[in-house]
Amino acid sequence: MTRTKPTTTTTPPPEGQACAGPCAGMNDTEMDIPTALVRLTALVQGVYARASERHGLTPVQARLLCVLLSGPRGMADLAQCFGVEKAALTGLMDRAERRGLAQRSSVPGDRRALQVTLTEAGHQAATAFHTEVNAELTHLTSSLTEDDREHLRTTMAEIITKCGTAPTPARH
């Protein structure tokens, strides 16, 4: 009797699943750290994207509003935070201003610099978005014990700190 090797086909992962290939069908306890991080990133980005859409924002607009919740920021600072050139940030700001979400103003004592602040509508949109995303992200860890959540928090903080390149934190 001759045995034939079973053939496998690769199919795309179901909608919303982060990973195909080596992790497809893998028990979560068998997952390696890079795969787990990629899948967790996809979960978080999915939450962010769905909440952005529900609030009539693009994910990058939502991120801008969340960054500005902590107070006015300079255009150069925002460009660095977003990892883009000032010209790309100008386009984002043009759209935010047209929607009445943020405004640019001169920086006292530096006529070349501009700072960005939220409008009242922008503050309301950012707060509503932040509240929704925070609740959904908190739900992702709701099955963990308090000790496990604290361990996850400190481990993530350690990783971010060791990278040394973490952008200025944005409130979600």
Image: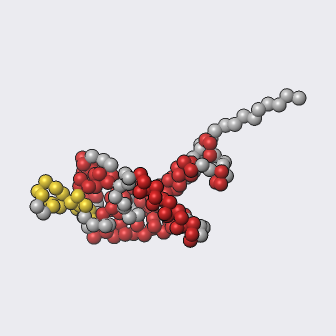
Residue that lies at the very extreme toward the top in this rendered image: 2
Whole-percent x and y of residue 101?
A: 28, 63
Q: Nearer the viewer, residue 90 or 44?
A: 44
* Scheme of colours in the image: secondary structure
Picture layout, residue 133 above or below residue 42 = below
Residue 90 visible in this rendered orientation of the protein: yes
Whole-percent x and y of residue 83?
A: 33, 49
Image check: 83 left or right of 19?
left
**Which residue shows up at 30% across the image and 47% down it?**
84
Residue 49 visible in this rendered orientation of the protein: no
Q: Nearer the viewer, residue 76 or 92?
A: 76
Q: Nearer the viewer, residue 24 or 129?
A: 24
Q: Nearer the viewer, residue 18 or 26?
A: 26
**Which residue shows up at 56% across the image and 50% down it?**
33
Whole-percent x and y of residue 149?
A: 54, 67
**Which residue shows up at 37% across the image and 60% down it?**
169
**Which residue shows up at 83% across the image and 31% down it?**
3
User: What is the count of numbered marks?
Assistant: 0
Q: Quadrant of the C terminus?
A: bottom left
Residue that lies at the very extreme toward the right in this rendered image: 1
Whole-percent x and y of residue 102?
A: 26, 62
Q: Quadrant of the N terminus?
A: top right
Looking at the rendering, which quadrant does residue 107 occupy?
bottom left
